[in-house]
Amino acid sequence: MLTLSLAATLESQAGQYRLLKEIPVGGEGGWDYLSVDSPPHRLYVSHGNKVVVIDTATETVCGEITDTPGVHGVAIAPELGRGLATCGRENKGAVIDLKTLQILSKVDTGANPDGMLYEPGRKEFYTFNGRGRSATVIDAQTEKVVATIPLGGKPEFAQADAPAGLVFNNLEDKSEVAVIDAQKHEVVNRWPIAPGEEASGMAFDEKNHRLFLGCGNKLMVMLDSATGKVLASVPIGQGVDANAFDPETGLAFASCGDGTVTIAKAEGDKLTVVQTLTTERGARTMTIDPATHKIYLATAKFDAPAEGRRRGRMTPDSFKILVYGPE
């Protein structure tokens, strides 16, 4: 009854997210992906040339992973206690012991590894290489490259459907989703995403076979992950760079650099906006902790832009994590 009551409460409050906390991090450098490992209460945030680790129970910084030049983010293999960080400036993936936060090895990838994921069906890490226009597949246990997959476009976020044996990847410059056979390690389909264009963020509802794409033309598009059919789209803000999905509430999120998160409810073939959450300018990347329903966004404070510059400079030591959750 408690579980049903919680689900009913969340359903009735769907979309009513508010700011819960700001977690100060500080330090210099940019940021990209965030990822959550729910059971051990860990949030991994790329920042400059390192990964900041935050305890989501206490919402404080509890460690860092260093020697990751140009890091974009970390893929988590929870059952192995390992992660993989993409080191864009080295063209390498760094295999990490998540208990000690030490790097176990570095593995050569294609040029400029950016996106990353863990495919649990075959226990493999993927790096999606921006300039290499390819995916590098790494055995998470042996730490060896097992395949390089040409993608024919610039890859962005990806998701794994382990039961179906598939990996989905946004090709931003092609406005399509590349469908990878996880056993064959090859692209077996390409799905156009119109009316969406230049998708970066991607989230996945495994139970209902839905992909949610954050597109550069200010749309969040929902696709059927079994057929590739575009089912629905809703307007979002400018500068989207991440998406998330909460399987318990059926909410899909799109975080945008203009300082908004669009929250939409997915029901069957319908996608309906239930809230436009005001965040902060620059908070374009995001992740969700499905255990608590909280979303985490990274940003910093910026000075007013000087004449001739499009945007202001980052205020020193102002990097932080914004925490939002349902009321």
Image (tube, helix red, strand yellow):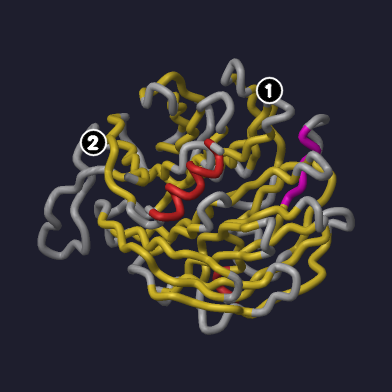
Residue 313 seen anywhere in this rendered image of the structure: yes
Q: How many marks?
A: 2
**At x 46% / y 27%, what residue is drawn?**
53
| Residue 151 inside the magenta-drawn segment | no
Q: Position of residue 227 (x, y in %)?
A: 74, 75
Q: Earlier in the sequence, mark 1 or mark 2?
A: 1
Write the residue at 42% across / 77% down: 217
- Three-letter code for the amino acid on which mark 1 is drawn: Leu
In the picture of the structure, the residue carrying the numbered disc 2 is 318
Instruction: Give the number of the disc on residue 308.
Output: none
Please provide the residue range marked out in magenta.
136-140
* Residue 143 figure quarter: top right
Cα distance in 3D space between marks 1 and 2: 31 Å
Q: Is residue 139 magenta?
A: yes
**Horizontal relation, residue 126 to residue 40: left or right:** right
Q: Name the residue rendered at 51%, 53% in the picture.
A: 249
User: Which is more toward the observer, 113 or 230?
Assistant: 230
Badge 1 local density, few (<14 within 10 Å), some, or many (20+)?
A: few
User: Along the line of sight, which residue is nearer the eye, 140 or 296?
Assistant: 296
Q: Amino acid at mark 2?
A: Ser
Q: Residue furthest right?
A: 184
The image's mark for residue 104 is: 1
Q: Position of residue 253 (x, y in %)?
A: 45, 58
Q: Is residue 239 or residue 145 the one in the foreground? A: 239
Magenta region's main secondary structure? strand
Q: Residues within 10 Å of mark 2 (few under 14, many from 20)?
A: some
Q: Provide residue 189's location: percent of width, then percent of height.
A: 77, 73
Mark in front: 1 vs 2: 2
Residue 70 appears left or right of 159:
left
Measured as percent of width and height from the top left, residue 250 is found at 53, 58
Quick one: quadrant of the N terminus?
top right
